[in-house]
Image: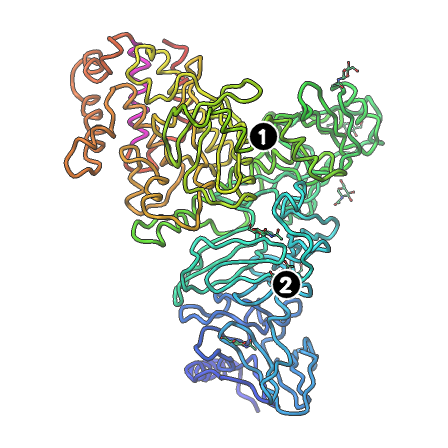
């Protein structure tokens, strides 16, 4: 009689632990097998980098997998890179992988009466042996050194260095973080030889990378190389036969790397030092986790993105989740129409900053809101309509929708969206406006990029560049939406026409070098020098006065430069400088901006024209511009170099922030230390996080803003003072802040304290109450502890709160 299980268990555990210490196997010969029950039944590669064996994927469920060996990882914590049976996990008892005498490698699930779950389908009369290479390739070698079968030929969601992605292979994401079975996202070579990312959901599918509305040619993809092969090399360079290539942000370092199509639909390259437990993202296809990736939220729901919490979904007002907890199932109406087009049953409710992608019934150009409304009213299956300014300006277009799909929050969206609801259905303001606040509990999603900046050495610089790239990528996302907003309606003609259409619509233009040479009279009138280049005044052929910035060291490829310049070109806010165009020709990289008559704040600080009211307006306007970058762009766009030289003044003395997003246009491959220190900010205005290895957030811009404001009201420049001090350093900056702080806290009457602080150039002509607020806000902005600083929008609010009560 068998002993009761409770006695067996400790014995079993003991045996298991003894087995753990036995060394794993170098290879598996014919007639041998690996058992799920024996933790020692693991193949290891010659130098021990990879292991292959049974990998736990659930409760009593195992996949036969290859993973990165790692002393600190155990079981499900390890990083699998390949799995034989991702769709059909096997039982934790008596399942085995066996190399049969016939040469076939089979995985059997003994829990299910010896069922064969997977096999390599190979035959070999002679000797055969299963081995694991140091590249992570699990292969079946025949007697003569040939390869009968290899795991590199059937990737799952990961591509390892030197593992080619070919016309016969594709990556398919996992279903979720803890479910390795096939998900809905695919990386593959399309029929036109272009490498793409596709969402292939249960009911809809669509390509989302490269952006489908820009022609492949224009993105620099080459359509005529049908060899269809893409490889990541061990140093971090990826090259595809469609001429798409990139280098990871840590290119060149000897690291462990993997390219994984994550369950959230983003394609990323991860790397780490051998032995480290943490993977860092060193490249990603969509540089954020945007709602643009299709299929995030289902039918009738809205996707919002917040870098801290990831993506979240919420239902369109009037709709409820179809399957609570599964947002991909979407939402269904919690009302019924007798028919959907009985006029006196229906009303339309306006949603702000919301748009839906695709599923237009048709497009009605140059029409009125009423006509649009009537169209949707009469169309029984119309669920709502978008009414927005046409891209050529002036007129309005109407887009009745028969499905509400790919909905997302888009703060920069200026059109209107109306949904059809029953007349007697009422909504609270909260339901219509503050949607994101009652969104679903954030599901644990993608890990946020490692944004810490390490000061020493090359890797620090590279990490920073990585981080910066992701920040600038944020702009890209916004632009993706904008571009989409302009273009996607007419998906029928997705060609270069779109690009010119867009360019015409936004006034954004590609210039030739000769045009700009002529416009700047052979670069004769220099008006400034700043991050990365010299700025010249120019008169464009259409008689607009422009500022042309000639970038040094900008060796970014033309296609990338185009993509990035147009990205920045479409960030649009009255307190942000407008980009009109660019030039990328040969080695020349130029940017064309609107010209600011009054130059920069730096040039105006000592001007008598800059009286108190103007200074206050500049404080508010600059804060609004930065708040837009930080918050409307969903916290992704940091400026990182806020200083008086980068705040330009227009003819009405309104400020416009310049030079955001610049570093993306510089060559990221060759960052020297001097470039690096320039890019990361300017001494005197830099937040302490930059030098103390803390994580970089939008609060670095808040800090710099605070310094600029102190400078503007006191007339004391932190930078010139730094130069005058021996040994450089941030000594004076450290003094300016405590000095101001001491002044404010000095006992005595407010009036006299202010008098001692305020720039004598103002000649005492200012509103003491507002001045006090401004100084108080500036001091809060320069708190050492970033969490104690307000956000830019709080700054705006604090400044304006006192606008009308003085
Ligand atoms: C094993 O790895 C070496 C380099 O480490 C490579 O040259 C060889 O082709 C690989 N063999 C297989 C079958 O992957
Ligand atoms: C993984 O997802 C698939 C598809 O939804 C499902 O059938 C399977 O049960 C899931 N596996 C686990 C372990 O949750
Ligand atoms: C096609 O791509 C492969 C792989 O990138 C490359 O080796 C080959 O030279 C390319 N062929 C042509 C004609 O461009
Ligand atoms: C591929 O890209 C390189 C560098 O961007 C360029 O020089 C080359 O002409 C491109 N090749 C094709 C076939 O487009
Ligand atoms: C969207 O939702 C409606 C119900 O509101 C349903 O009938 C329709 O099939 C759904 N479509 C998709 C693509 O899921
Ligand atoms: C738009 O329609 C109005 C009225 O039908 C017409 O007068 C106007 O010319 C149209 N505008 C354009 C740009 O087509
Ligand atoms: C709205 O009207 C429909 C039919 O006209 C009715 O069934 C429903 O109960 C009404 N709902 C409310 C909240 O009055």
User: Against 13, is 574 above or below?
Assistant: above
Q: Is residue 587 visible?
A: yes
CB of mark 2 within 8 Å of CB of mark 1? Answer: no
Secondary element type, mark 1 = strand
Front one among 662 and 282: 662
Front one among 741 and 253: 253
User: Against 531, is 200 above or below?
Assistant: below
Q: What's the residue at 41%, 14% (across, down)?
A: 653
Q: What's the residue at 55%, 17% (across, down)?
A: 543
Provide the residue designation for mark 2: 181
User: Against 524, is 729 above or below?
Assistant: below
Quadrant position of residue 316: top right
Residue 253, image x and y in percent? 40, 61
Report crowding for label 1: few under 14, some 14 to 19, many 20 or more residues within 10 A (C-alpha): some
For disc 2, does the CB lie below 8 Å from ligand 2? yes
Task: Tell me the quarter of the image containing the C terminus.
Answer: top left
Question: Is 580 left or right of 106, judged from the image as shown?
Answer: left
Residue 134, image x and y in percent? 49, 75
Question: Is 627 left or right of 301, judged from the image as shown?
Answer: left
Sequence-wise first label, 2 or 1: 2
Task: Tell me the quarter of the image containing the N terminus.
Answer: bottom right
Front one among 557 and 780: 557
Provide the residue designation for mark 1: 509
Q: Nearer the viewer, mark 2 or mark 1?
A: 1
The magenta-colored residue range is 766-782
């Amino acid at each position: 009689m068998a002993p009761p299980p409770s006695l067996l268990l400790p014995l079993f555990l003991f045996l298991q632990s003894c087995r753990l210490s036995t060394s794993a196997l170098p290879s598996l010969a014919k007639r041998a097998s690996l058992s799920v029950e024996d933790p020692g039944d693991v193949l290891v590669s010659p130098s021990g980098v990879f292991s292959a064996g049974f990998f736990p994927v659930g409760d009593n469920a195992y996949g036969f997998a290859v993973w990165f060996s790692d002393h600190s990882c155990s079981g499900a914590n390890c990083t699998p890179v390949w799995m034989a049976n991702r769709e059909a996990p096997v039982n934790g008892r008596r399942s085995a992988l066996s190399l049969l005498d016939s040469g076939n490698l089979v995985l059997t699930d003994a829990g299910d009466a010896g069922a064969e779950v997977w096999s390599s389908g190979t035959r070999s009369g002679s000797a055969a042996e299963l081995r694991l290479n140091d590249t992570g390739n699990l292969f079946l070698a025949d007697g003569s050194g040939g390869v009968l079968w290899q795991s590199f030929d059937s990737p799952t969601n990961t591509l390892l260095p030197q593992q080619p992605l070919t016309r016969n292979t594709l990556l398919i994401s996992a279903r979720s973080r803890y479910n390795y079975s096939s998900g809905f996202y695919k990386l593959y070579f399309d029929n036109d030889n272009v490498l793409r990312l596709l969402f292939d959901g249960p009911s809809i599918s669509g390509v989302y990378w490269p952006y489908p509305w820009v022609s492949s040619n224009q993105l620099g993809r080459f359509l005529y190389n049908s060899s269809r092969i893409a490889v990541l090399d061990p140093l971090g360079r990826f090259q595809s036969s469609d001429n798409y290539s990139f280098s990871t942000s840590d290119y060149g370092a000897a690291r462990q790397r993997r390219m994984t199509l994550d369950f959230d639909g983003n394609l990323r390259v991860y790397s780490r030092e051998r032995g480290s437990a943490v993977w860092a993202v060193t490249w990603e296809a969509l540089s954020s986790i945007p709602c643009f990736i299709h299929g995030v939220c289902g039918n009738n729901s809205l996707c919002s993105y917040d870098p801290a919490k990831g993506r979240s979904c919420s239902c369109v007002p009037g709709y409820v989740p179809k399957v609570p907890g599964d947002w991909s199932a979407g939402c269904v109406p919690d009302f019924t129409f007798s028919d959907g087009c009985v006029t006196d049953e229906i009303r339309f409710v306006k949603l702000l900053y919301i748009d839906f992608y695709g599923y237009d019934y048709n497009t009605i150009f140059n029409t009125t809101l009423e006509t649009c409304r009537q169209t949707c009213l009469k169309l029984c299956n119309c669920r709502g309509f978008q009414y927005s300014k046409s891209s050529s300006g002036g007129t309005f277009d109407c887009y009745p929708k028969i499905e509400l799909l790919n909905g997302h929050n888009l703060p920069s969206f200026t059109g209107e969206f109306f949904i059809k609801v029953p007349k007697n259905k009422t909504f609270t303001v909260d339901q219509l406006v503050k949607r994101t606040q009652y969104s679903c509990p954030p599901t644990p999603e993608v890990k946020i990029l490692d944004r810490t900046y390490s000061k020493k050495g090359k890797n620090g610089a590279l990490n920073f560049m990585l981080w910066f790239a992701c920040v600038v990528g944020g702009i890209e996302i916004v632009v993706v939406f904008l571009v989409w907003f302009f273009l996607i309606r007419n998906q029928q003609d997705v060609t270069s026409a779109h690009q010119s259409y867009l360019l015409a619509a936004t006034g954004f233009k590609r210039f030739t070098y000769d045009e700009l040479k002529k416009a700047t009279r052979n670069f004769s009138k220099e008006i400034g020098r700043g991050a990365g280049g010299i700025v010249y005044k120019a008169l464009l052929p259409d008689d607009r006065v422009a500022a042309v910035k000639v970038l040094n060291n900008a060796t970014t490829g033309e296609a990338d430069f185009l993509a990035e310049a147009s990205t920045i070109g479409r960030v649009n806010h009255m307190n942000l400088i407008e980009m009109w165009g660019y030039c990328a020709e040969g080695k020349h990289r130029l940017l064309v901006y609107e010209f600011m008559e009054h130059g920069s704040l730096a040039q105006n600080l000592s001007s008598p024209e800059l009286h108190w009211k103007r200074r206050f307006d500049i404080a508010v306007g600059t804060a609004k511009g930065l708040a837009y970058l930080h918050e409307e762009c969903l916290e992704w766009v940091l400026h990182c170099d806020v200083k008086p030289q980068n705040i330009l003044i227009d003819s009405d003395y309104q400020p416009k922030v310049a030079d955001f997003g610049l570093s993306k246009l510089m060559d990221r491959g060759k960052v020297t230390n001097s470039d690096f220190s320039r890019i990361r900010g300017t001494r005197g205005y830099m937040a302490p996080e930059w030098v103390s290895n803390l994580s970089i957030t939008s609060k670095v811009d808040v800090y710099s803003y605070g310094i600029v404001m102190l400078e503007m009201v006191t007339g004391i420049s932190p930078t010139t003072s730094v130069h005058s001090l021996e040994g450089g350093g941030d000594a004076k900056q450290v003094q300016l802040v405590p000095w101001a702080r001491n002044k404010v806290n000095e006992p005595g009457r407010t009036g006299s304290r202010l008098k001692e602080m305020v720039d004598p150039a103002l000649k005492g002509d200012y509103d003491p109450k507002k001045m006090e607020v401004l100084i108080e806000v500036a001091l809060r902005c320069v708190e050492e502890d970033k969490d104690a600083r307000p956000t830019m929008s709080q700054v705006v609010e604090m400044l304006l709160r006192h606008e009308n009560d003085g």
